[in-house]
Image (tube, rainbow, N blue to C red):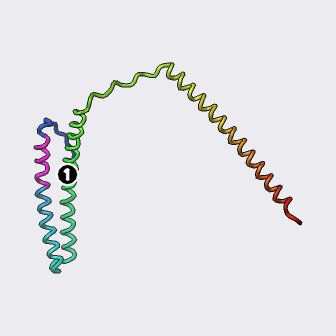
Amino acid sequence: MKVTIQHSINLEDVPEKAHELLMPVEEKIDNAMRWLNALSRDLSTNSITAELASTSINRIRKVLGDCDITLNEVGSIMQGVADYEKESLLPPSPPPASVPTSNDFAQLEQAMEYAAKEKEQTELIQALALEKYEALKKEKETINESDIPF
């Protein structure tokens, strides 16, 4: 079972610590590559059983999975350092916005009332346009029916 621990170190010591964490990963990946080369060679010469090949593949996958976990952890550490370095180069953040005043709320209410009136006017214009469209459509149908000779 794997557990996560926290360990505080000086910022300048992070690269060395990352190197220490990556050394076993490098060794495991080298071993996995040797196993994979041997497996590939054995498969090409048909000198390995399917069961043994499957076992070898699972062993390689487990080692690579363990490596991936460590690589992810070290990657997160280094990303944290990169984020810190970016932040330290940025100018200071602006002060927080002021608390809205009653005048701000009054302006907001006025804007909402205006928007409501605009909406009402738009709906009225749409209703009138639809009414006019229906009348023209009915008039056209009436004209077309009177043109029929029988």
Residue 21 or 110: which is nearer the viewer?
110
Check disc 1 and report its element: helix, strand or loop. helix
Identify residue type, mark 1. Leu
Specify few, some or many for label 1: CA neighbours under 10 Å numbering under 14, 14-19, or 20 or more. some
x, y (%) of residue 82?
21, 41
Residue drawn at point x = 69 percent, y = 38 percent: 124
In this figure, which residue is indicated by the disc labeled 1? 71
Give me the residue at 12% from left, 37% from top.
12
Q: Residue at x 75, y 45 (%)?
A: 132
Q: Main secondary structure of the magenta part?
A: helix
Q: Is residue 150 left or right of residue 110?
A: right
> In the image, residue 146 lies at what x, y percent?
86, 59
Q: Quadrant of residue 57?
A: bottom left
Q: Which residues are magenta?
A: 14-25
Q: Residue reaching furthest top?
A: 102
In the rendered image, residue 104, in percent from the top left (x then y), is placed at 49, 22
Above or below for 54 versus 66: below
